Image (cartoon, grey):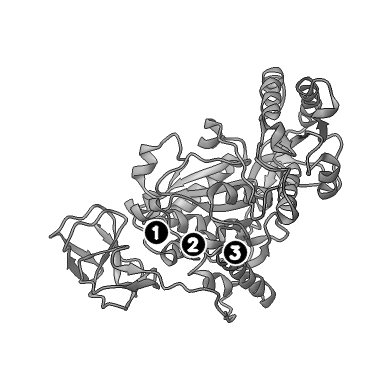
Amino acid sequence: MSILKINERDNVAVAIDDIKKGEILTAGPSSVTALEDVAKGHKIAIKDIQKGENVIKYGFAIGHAVSDIKAGQWVHSHNLKTNLGEILNYEYHPELKQQEPAGCNKTFNGYRRIGGRAGVRNEIWIIPTVSCVNRNAQIIAQQATKKYMGTCNIDGIYEFTHPYGCSQLGQDQLNTQKILADLVNHPNAGGVLVLGLGCENNNIPEFKKVLGEYDSERVKFLVAQEVEDEIQEGVKLIGELVEYASRFNREDIPISELTVGLKCGGSDGFSGITANPLVGSFSDRLISCGGSTVLTEVPEMFGAETILMNRAQNREVFEKTVKLINDFKEYFMGYNQPIYENPSPGNKKGGITTLEEKSLGCTQKGGTSNVVDVLQYAETVKQKGLSLLSAPGNDMVASTALAAAGCQIILFTTGRGTPLGTAVPTVKIATNSDIFNKKSSWMDFNAGRLLEGDSMEKLTDELMEYIIKIASGMPTKSENMGFREIAIFKNGVTL
């Protein structure tokens, strides 16, 4: 199979392997002769396309031809442009499916927290309120790891540094406080040390107002300016947290208590054919078992947003989805930036041409389930099922937002490859076997096998079992490499 026609309406196909000029290619009942070389993952016209005519992939328009394209020609940025416009008016045309519980009895071996929530790791987290104490947090984590790890029931001691917490105003400061508060409350953390400087905008008394109620055994606070040796005092407090968190042991927990984030980065021409549909199939499976998933990267919904809008479970969720999309468009326009400044150079090299094409692939991570809720940035999951979350496409910012929303695990699909990891286990799912084999230290699961004969049902089963292992303690590749970082969305001025 050298080319793949995804939908019967398509007038382009995807090169499964590199194509040489003169090759005769078969797409369904018809054949086409390649008029030029086409790299794998890229598009080739399988019928003549007139200038101005829509180019169809996945059964939807991904843009229009800016010149006549002959069957057999390469279709990419030189002859295909986006159809996207600015703010649009939307109508609600519900396309809902009946979602019956599957009676799933699968479990994972996780940690039951006081209050009932479930975690997949039993870690100690150090959360700086301000960037001024980032290095202090790192040193405390290093010294505490040497002193306590290996003698306790703890999966690790980690700091989550960031550049904010002072010189911020309004919504930016509140976003910083909310994201940090969400992390303090995350069930993957058995204990948390909040480390402040003392003179910052986001000082600990102010931060506590956003944090709300907390368990004083689980959450400790330290103001560096108020003690003689904050490193010594921090290590001591970590010892108290280690003692507390060591009381928790893994136990069987229904997978209905898993909340999984859905993310992609470094996409290629196979993302919408293999890894993203596989993650969508997993999402549907987990939701049928009573679990939850969260889809974000709002700018990468542009061009495919009506698919999600029509899956909104009611008009209220539809209206929230419309606001989600248009708010992000207005954000771009407010800075005089085009809303379609995407895909990235790496995406284009991998075969993706327009934002519509990227979005039609990206949104497949949400499967076919109804959309039950729309979350603002830094909000946490409230309902079982598929939720949409407001966050940009930037890999680290979006991954952090998913973790802060309460996701215990993130599924991250990629065709170009990335070692990135955030506060929670981040599972890298390769779109093709080449990148899976080439970057074996980065990649956790190979969805490229869908191009090699494995069925979606088989790989969904395997991915489900793999995620249960991750939830039960098996480390991801990014965890093994020590990639544990966060990034917070910023939109305003810096003092």
Point out residue 148 in the picture as x, y percentages from the top left corner: 71, 20
Q: Residue at left 57%, top 56%?
A: 392
- Total residue callouts: 3
Disc 1 crowd rating (10 Å Cα; few below 14, some 14-19, many 20+) is many
Point out the frontmost of discs 1 and 3. Answer: 3
Q: Measured along the vertical axis of the image, is residue 150 above or below residue 46?
A: above
Q: Is residue 244 left or right of residue 386?
A: right
Q: CA distance from mark 1 to mark 3?
A: 30 Å
Residue that appears at 62% across and 55% down:
104
- Label ID, residue 163: none
Horizontal placement of 351 versus 402: left or right? left
Q: Are the two marked residues, 2 and 1, in contact with CB atoms closer than 8 angstroms?
A: no
Residue 344 falls in image quadrant: bottom left
Percent position of residue 88, x then y: 55, 77
Vertical placement of residue 155 versus 79, above or below: above
Which of the numbered marks, if any, corresponds to residue 273? 1
The disc at residue 331 is 3
Image quadrant in which the N terminus is located: bottom left
Residue at 85 percent across and 28 percent down: it is: 226
Residue 23 at what x, y percent from top left? 15, 59
Q: Residue at x 51, y 58 (%)?
A: 365
User: Counting residues from the N terminus, which is met first, the one under dot 2 or under dot 1?
Assistant: 1
Name the residue carrying label 2. Answer: 364
Q: Give the farthest residue toward the front.
A: 495
Q: Amino acid at mark 3?
A: Tyr
Q: Earlier in the sequence, mark 2 or mark 3?
A: 3
| Residue 99 in view, yes or no | no
Q: Amino acid at mark 2?
A: Gln
Of the residues under marks 1 and 3, which one precedes in the sequence? Answer: 1
Q: Secondary structure at mark 2?
A: helix
Q: Residues within 10 Å of mark 2 (few under 14, many from 20)?
A: many
